[in-house]
Amino acid sequence: MPHTDAIVVLTTVASDEEAAKLVRALLERRLIACGTMFPGARSMYRWQGKIADEKEVVIMLKTRSARLDSLRSAFAELHPYKVPELLAMPVAAGLDKYLDWISGETTLALA
């Protein structure tokens, strides 16, 4: 199995508009190769001592582990939540062409 530094990062936002704005900004900075948005999610969580029940958009970001620190910094600037979800999961394997594409799209990062 070839080594890859590709990762999938999960986050959530409150609306389609927020999702598109965040993904576009990350693409423009070349921090991600792709952002896939899944509207219609429902999240239940404890926040400030109460249980919240909210509709959200789940975003799956494809990038490289080498971009994770820059992505964290961009989230601090761009993400609309006070405590944004940022969960990075390693990609064990994938199609070489797709993994090469992720690498190429995020190698010339501007941030």
Image (cartoon, rainbow, N blue to C red):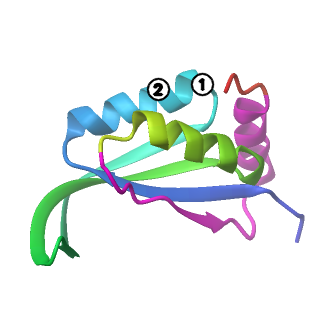
* Horizontal arrangement in the rendering, residue 19 relative to residue 62 (left or right): left
Q: Is residue 86 above or below residue 76?
A: below
Q: Position of residue 88 (x, y in %)?
A: 58, 63
Amino acid residing under circle 2: Ala
Q: Is residue 48 above or below residue 26?
A: below
Outermost residue, right side: 2
Image-quadrant location for residue 65 = bottom right
Q: Position of residue 102 (x, y in %)?
A: 70, 41
Residue identified by numbered label 1: 29
Amino acid residing under circle 1: Arg
Q: Residue 57 in magenta?
A: no
Q: Secondary structure at mark 2?
A: helix
Mark 1 to mark 2 CA distance (whole Å): 6 Å
Q: Quadrant of the C terminus?
A: top right
Q: Secondary structure at mark 1?
A: loop
Q: Quadrant of the N terminus?
A: bottom right
* Horizontal arrangement in the rendering, residue 41 relative to residue 38 (left or right): left
Taking the spot 71% from the left edge, 34% from the top edge, the residue there is 106
Q: Which mark is residue 25?
A: 2
